[in-house]
Amino acid sequence: MEEQKPKKKKNKICYFFLTIALISTLALFGGSIYQGLKEGLEIKNLIMLLLSTVFVIFFIFTAIIAGRKGKTSAILASLALILLNCFELALQFNLIKLPNQKLENLTNRSLTEAVKYAEKNNIELTQIYEYSDMIKEYNIIGQNIKENKNLKQVKKLTVAVSEGPNPDKDVIIPNMLTWSDEAVLKFIKENHLTNVEVEFIESAKLKNTVIEQEQSGNRKRSDLLKLKFSLGEATDITETKLIDLTKKSEFEAIFWLKQHAIDYETKTDFSNKIKRGFVMSQSEKLGTLLKPKESKITLTISKGPKIKVPDLTKMTTSEITEWIIKNKLKVEFKDEYDDKVKNNKVIKANYKKGDFIEQKTLVSITLSKGKLKMPKINNLDELKSWAEKYNIIYQEEYEFDSLVEKGQIIKVSHKEGETIKNGETITVTISQGKKTKVPKVIGLKKQAIITALKEANLKYSFVYQDNEKIEKDVAIAQSLKEGSEVSEDAMITVTLSTGKKKTQTSNNKPTNSTNNSNNSNSGNNNNNNTTPTNPTPSCEEKSYTVSSKLRDIFTSYDGYSNVSNALYAFFASNYPNVKISVIGVSDTQMNSGSYVSGLKPGSSIKSCNTTPYTISIAK
């Protein structure tokens, strides 16, 4: 008896492992069915799964019945089976990933499958819609990354989704004269023609054959095709019994009514049973006797089901895709950063919960990319490009800085890696470079002015103004206020006096013109009685792109007059023969001299322009 105790203990260990193997097998079977219902389980895979499960169950029971014979092999076999089942379950529920998994070919698979595959493998999926005669609607036409690429390297994937046949595809329309009605209808259906207009008229030619055709040759499917059919002679047009037009397409139903000279009208309504564009009801019963040119039938055409929009913001992308396909809608996915909505969750949709829409409606979904982090910004252009891309509001502030080059960023209000909250404004501080004080030049002569401005590291330009009281070349105005602090290399415009005008002395001797006029009756009309004038030099047309230095004027000058003078001087020195007009705008709630609209850095301009280019600034 004592010798048998350890044997029983060993049997219990064997039974324990076999029981665990049975439980794991049933768990794998249940998990496989669950995943199959979610993702679509093919019949052959279901049969293989069922047979393998039955085999394992029989193996386990055989091992239990066998008892102590082969107990070691039974324990090892059950242990291997447990490990295999656990591994399969982990793969199914995405708990582990095999190394070097390859990207699958999604072509001809449904959009729902593609979305679920992308979600399962953490791939950002982009959908574009294309027409296809070969691929079923909402199935995948192709993908931008070829199959068998290492799955770990695939972060983004774009798939082309079929919209069905292309209505604008070119087809060759043959000469259909003498074709029967059946042949014409077959051709229209096979070639997906969408804009065919038919008419039936009395004719001695064979009834229900084409007698006139307006268009033929290479045409688009959506182009109008007009056909006239023969009704036969008047004696051929007789009463007819109404057939069942329901479930026929609108075109086919109207074709039949015209074919029998029956007047008609159409209306539309929603239907959960009848396909969109097909007849859902007719005003007269099946078998009703209809009189040609007297009877009238009303057809109700289906708009498809009345689709009630669910709360799309609470659905996953795969759930939305399934809903879109089920209801024959179109969808576009956009994305943007949002600090309140988790990554890949819906931020908003163009239709809200409870709205009613029709089939083929485009539903636009905006998905969250999660929190937007402040990137490393190197220059102002980079900041502007980034802000524009992600709809970030930013404002510019300016400070003098002797260490940071003019136009470069001193600091940004948000640190690198910091979260940008929804609607938050980024403040960027830009260097105005080294500062200098504007000297007083009014009253100084031109050479003294040049010396003073060079010492202050200012750029300068001169304009002249009539003033007989002030000596020539003496400054009477300056565009920058004396003592004001501006950037080095800022432009200052100095207005110089023209001085007193020289008076011309008169000569009492008779002039040549007088002599010429006295001799005008002598017939010598070519005796230089007019003074020759120099021809006006022609303007040479050139094209320019306005420099980014234009922006410096608005940061270096204050006040309407100063900015206006600086603008005229800037264009005169940099863009010869380009006419500009500075316009003052009131009530802008902006500082005087601030830019409002018009020419700006990057604008294209041409010289010799007859109409001045405008720049509007705050007055």
Image: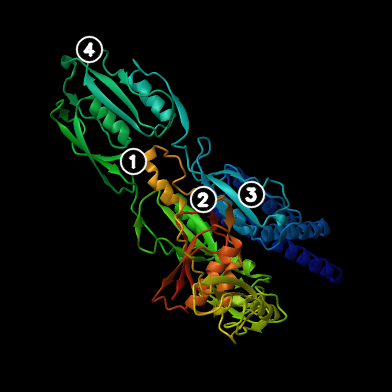
Q: Distance between the residues labelled 3 and 1?
A: 43 Å
Residue 277 percent coordinates (x, y)? 33, 41
Residue 15 percent coordinates (x, y)? 74, 63
- Is the residue under label 4 in contact with that under label 3 (CB below 8 Å)? no
Task: Give the colour scheme shown.
Answer: rainbow
Residue type (three-letter) at the residue carrying disc 3:
Leu
Depth check: 576 or 551 in front?
A: 576
- Is the residue under label 4 in contact with that under label 1 (CB below 8 Å)? no
Q: Name the residue under label 3.
A: 49
Q: Distance between the residues labelled 4 and 2?
A: 82 Å
Name which quarter of the figure residue 355 lies in. Answer: bottom left
Q: Is mark 2 on a helix, strand or loop?
A: loop
Of badges 3 and 1, the one in the foreground is 1
Q: Mark 2 points at which residue?
A: 536
Please determine whether, in this image, residue 357 is positioned above or below residue 139.
below
- Is the residue under label 1 in contact with that under label 3 (CB below 8 Å)? no
Q: Is mark 4 on a helix, strand or loop?
A: loop
Residue 150 percent coordinates (x, y)? 73, 52
Question: Residue at the right extreme?
Answer: 3
Name the N-terminal-most of marks 1 and 4: 4
Residue type (three-letter) at the residue carrying disc 1:
Gly
Q: How far apart are marks 2 and 1 (CA)?
A: 73 Å
Residue type (three-letter) at the residue carrying disc 2:
Thr
Residue type (three-letter) at the residue carrying disc 4:
Ala
Of badges 3 and 4, the one in the foreground is 4
Q: Name the residue under label 1.
A: 277
Q: Which residue is drawn at 54% across and 71% down?
A: 464
How packed is label 2: few (under 14 Cα within 10 Å), some, or many (20 or more)?
few
Name which quarter of the figure residue 295 lies in. Answer: top left
Of badges 3 and 2, the one in the foreground is 2
Could you say which disc has been placed on residue 204 in the image? 4
